[in-house]
């Protein structure tokens, strides 16, 4: 874990970001984005686009790939990070990026400074990172590419997390302060404390146990279950207050497996307290005793995080677990790949469709290009 590598930011001009954004847009519907589409969305000549792409490739912000039907370019995770950072910078939410403080299977966490040099946390969602690496082996990826792309999945994971953060924070739940979200990045306040997994002793173990169980119950009364309520997702502040983090896997209390998730959260707390503090308690919340009083789940889905996104996200999390299994085994899907060689070019009809789409996307691009070239002022 080190510093976030922003070295290339210095050399990039607005033209580079223009092409990077065109690449991002093209990837909404294309496994690899052909040069003419990029140049058309970016509104730059092909020659210029090609040259800029060369710079982006050198800086590993984009890659060149042989696709199934034609060759083209792809945005890398690093390229996506840069796009988010630039936008956050333009909004004056983030001034600088510092050290990495956490790494999970599906996220990277960095400390950053806001424009007044206060500490904030950047959570880069990496959902679909595994399938991104193994993309050529995934047939069904192409049938539903929009819903399976790592770009889309990591973006909706961030959107979900931020929506819940906001809703919970507004209700005075002990969560980090939500600051902003952009693409796959959530910006929130830094919690000063120790994750429960690093806490070896507590002044009052029973009191902490009660607080955590009360939190699980209060969430349920609001219609939601954290469903990953473990010692890595609870930070104990110096004042001894537990703050919960990590919300992309939250489920509604109406979820078909709600009782399972609820009991698992409760059991998790019991296990941690038994193991760490030798604390055993017969009293713990029961699912059937919960009386729902509010509809936070409904409110969040009304705030832009749609049902479809929820379905796609759940599927991705389930699939992530599945993939972890097969990766340990063999790579049995390789052979199918060979048949599908790229046949060089794409057909004129497709190019036409592509250009229409580019027209539609130009407005969105203009919007983002309003942001000035902050690198110059950096
Ligand atoms: P993951 O989905 O990878 O588990 P988390 O949101 O749980 O991501 O963050 C991973 C780790 O980063 C946490 O266990 C915690 O140590 C640290 N972390 C995350 N958010 C914050 C925050 N707002 N303040 C302080 N530390 C944080
Ligand atoms: Mg976590």
Image (spheres, rainbow, N blue to C red):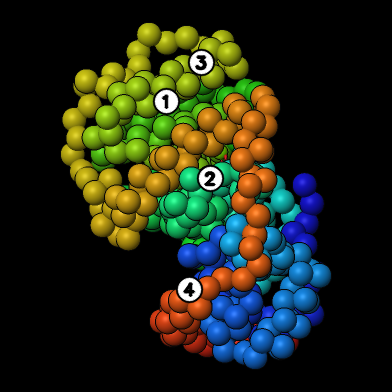
Q: Nearer the viewer, residue 12 or 277?
A: 12
Task: Answer with mark 4 or mark 3, whichever residue precedes in sequence.
Answer: 3
Q: Is mark 2 within 8 Å of ligand 1?
A: no
Give the vertical position of 357 relative to 139 (above or below): below
- Identify the residue under disc 2: 139
* Quadrant assignment, res 337: top right
**Mark 4 or 3: the one toward you:** 4
Residue 112 appears in the rendering: no
Give x and y (percent) for residue 163: 38, 55
First reached walking from the N terminus: tag 1 or tag 2: 2
Q: Is residue 188 above or below residue 83?
A: above
The answer to whether one can see residue 325 in this image is: yes
Please name whichever residue, 204 or 354, is drawn nearer the observer in this view of the structure.
354
Residue 350, which numbered label? 4
Which circle's residue, 4 or 2, is located before the other in the chain? 2
Residue matched to label 1: 265
Judging from the image, what secondary structure is the residue with disc 4 in? helix
Q: Position of residue 270 (x, y in %)?
A: 46, 17
Whole-number angstrom distance, CA of label 4 to CA of label 2: 21 Å
Mark 1 and mark 3 residues within 8 Å of each other at the beta carbon: no
x then y, percent, for residue 53:
72, 76
Look at discs 4 and 1 and give the one toward the viewer.
Answer: 4
> Disc 1 and disc 3: Cα gap in Å?
10 Å
Please give the residue where the numbered disc 3 appears in the rendered image: 271
Query: Secondary structure beneath disc 2?
Result: loop
What's the distance in space between the residues labelled 3 and 2, CA to CA?
41 Å
């Amino acid at each position: 874990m080190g510093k976030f590598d922003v070295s290339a930011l210095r050399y990039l001009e607005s033209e580079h970001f223009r092409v990077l954004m065109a690449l991002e847009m093209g990837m909404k519907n294309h496994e690899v984005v052909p040069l003419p589409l990029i140049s058309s969305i970016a509104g730059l000549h092909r020659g210029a686009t090609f040259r800029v792409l060369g710079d982006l490739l050198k800086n590993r912000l984009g890659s060149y790939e042989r696709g199934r039907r034609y060759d083209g370019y792809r945005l890398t995770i690093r390229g996506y990070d840069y796009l988010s950072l630039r936008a956050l910078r333009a909004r004056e939410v983030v001034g600088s990026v510092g050290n990495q403080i956490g790494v999970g299977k599906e996220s990277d966490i960095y400390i950053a400074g806001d424009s007044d040099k206060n500490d904030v946390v950047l959570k880069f969602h990496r959902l679909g990172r595994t399938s991104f690496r193994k993309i050529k082996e995934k047939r069904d990826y192409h049938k539903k590419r929009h819903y399976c792309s790592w770009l889309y999945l990591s973006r909706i994971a961030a959107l979900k997390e931020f929506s819940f953060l906001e809703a919970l924070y507004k209700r005075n739940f002990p969560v980090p302060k939500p600051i902003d979200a952009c693409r796959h990045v959530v910006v929130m306040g830094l919690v000063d404390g120790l994750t429960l997994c690093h806490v070896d002793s507590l002044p009052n173990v029973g009191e902490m146990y009660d607080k955590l169980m009360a939190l699980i119950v209060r969430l349920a009364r609001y219609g939601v279950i954290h469903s990953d309520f473990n010692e890595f997702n609870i930070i104990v502040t110096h004042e001894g207050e537990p703050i919960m983090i990590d919300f992309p896997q939250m489920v509604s209390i109406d979820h078909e497996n709600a009782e399972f998730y609820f009991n698992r959260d409760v059991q998790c707390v019991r296990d941690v307290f038994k193991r760490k503090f030798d604390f055993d308690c017969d009293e713990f919340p029961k699912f059937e005793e919960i009386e729902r009083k509010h509809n936070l789940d409904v409110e969040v889905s009304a705030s832009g995080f749609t049902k479809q996104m929820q379905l796609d996200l759940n599927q991705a999390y389930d699939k992530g677990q599945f993939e972890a299994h097969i990766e340990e085994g063999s790579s049995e899907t390789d052979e199918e790949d060979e048949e599908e060689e790229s046949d060089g070019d794409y057909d004129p009809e497709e190019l036409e469709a592509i250009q229409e789409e580019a027209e539609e996307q130009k407005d969105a691009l203009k919007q983002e290009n309003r942001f000035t070239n902050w690198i110059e002022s950096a």
